[in-house]
Amino acid sequence: MANSQSPSNAADRPRLTEAQKKENHIRSEQKRREAIREGFDRLASIAPGMEGQGRSEAVVLEATIKYMREKIMERQKIIAEAKAQGVDTTGWELPKETLEACEAQLKRTLLEEQQDAMMAKKS
């Protein structure tokens, strides 16, 4: 397979001007931003309460994390109920690290909410 940067291939192409390089960079950056925007729009369409709102990326991420945590906890409840009924749940379990991260995130969120409530009382 020929290298695209081989001397004969590179000599055949004219060099880009600084203006062309700048324009290429601008277009690449616009595409990157658009991809990020579309990704956040997709997350917002999944996370409850985010539809059609003006929002920051931080708000979308927080809502998505909350929604995922709720779904993980629902899944764990379903697994526990299935086990209690004697259903073989082999292969249903999430990785231990995922569950631990979910629990840690929940604790952080609860702590932040408590701190916010205390600050609100002081104000």
Image (cartoon, rainbow, N blue to C red):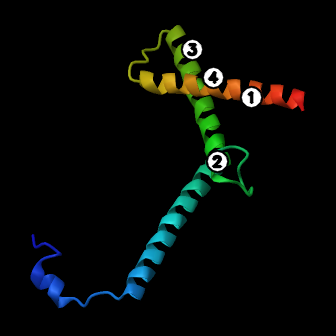
x and y percentages locating residue 102 in the rendered image: 55, 27
Quadrant of the rendered image containing residue 39 = bottom right
| 1 displayed left or right of 81 | left
Residue 85 in view in this figure: no
Callout 4 environment at 10 Å: few (<14), some (14 to 19), or many (20+)?
few
Disc 3 is placed on an element classified as helix
**What number is the disc on residue 113?**
1
Quadrant of the rendered image containing residue 97 = top left
x and y percentages locating residue 42 in the rendered image: 58, 54
Disc 1 is placed on an element classified as helix
Amino acid tagged 2: Ala
Which of the two labelled residues, at mark 2 and mark 4, occupies the earlier sequence position?
2
Amino acid tagged 3: Glu
Closer-to-camera residue (62/88)? 62
Which of the two labelled residues, at mark 1 and mark 4, occupies the earlier sequence position?
4
Q: Which residue is mark 4?
A: 107
Callout 3 environment at 10 Å: few (<14), some (14 to 19), or many (20+)?
few
Residue at 25% x, 91% y is: 14
| 18 displayed left or right of 76 | left
Residue at 88% x, 28% y is: 122
Q: Which residue is mark 3?
A: 81
